[in-house]
Image (cartoon, rainbow, N blue to C red):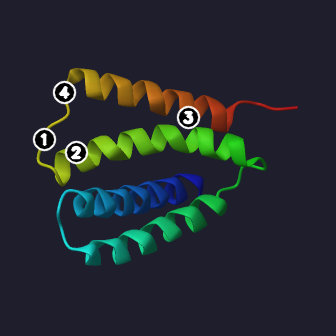
Amino acid sequence: MTLPLYVLAALAEIAGCFAVWHWWRGASALWLVPGALALAGFALLLALTPPAHAGRSFAAYGGIYIAASLGWLWLVEKTRPDLWDILGGALALAGAAVILFAPRA
């Protein structure tokens, strides 16, 4: 259940931030309404993730966020990630996996 929560949280955060970004560049202030709702949804989804410590959950989420942002770049902004984007995203996902799945005492 962890991965779907992180992916949904990333999509909500990216959509919310994109709405604010779009408004800041001249779009209607009405963009702020779905943006605020998306960011509230992001916070709730991230709070539902299983790690016992918020910092660990947020750190692991960072890798998922990076990969999802590159997906947004490609699918929404129509800019294909280059080799360096993909390499950086893979490294971030590897780091997230270490944080989430490392054996702990």
Task: Using the image, determine if residue 65 lies above or below residue 90.
Answer: below
Q: Amino acid at mark 2?
A: Leu
- Mark 2 / mark 1, whichever is N-terminal: 2
| Residue at the (22%, 45%) spot, across then down | 73
| Residue at the (57%, 63%) spot, across then down | 43
Between the residue at mark 4 and the residue at mark 2, the CA separation in whole angstroms equals 11 Å
- SS category of the residue bearing label 2: helix
Disc 1 crowd rating (10 Å Cα; few below 14, some 14-19, many 20+) is few
Q: Contact, CB < 8 Å: mark 2 with mark 1?
A: yes
| Residue at the (59%, 54%) spot, across then down | 2
- Mark 3 / mark 1, whichever is N-terminal: 1
| Residue at the (43%, 58%) spot, across then down | 13
Where does residue 84 sit, x and y in percent of width and height? 26, 21
- Mark 3 / mark 4, whichever is N-terminal: 4
Where residue 32 is drawn, which disc sits there?
none
- The residue singled out by tag 4 in the image is 82
Name the image quarter holding residue 48: bottom right
- The residue singled out by tag 2 in the image is 73
- The residue singled out by tag 1 in the image is 79
Task: Using the image, determine if residue 59 lies above or below residue 51.
Answer: above
- Mark 4 / mark 2, whichever is N-terminal: 2
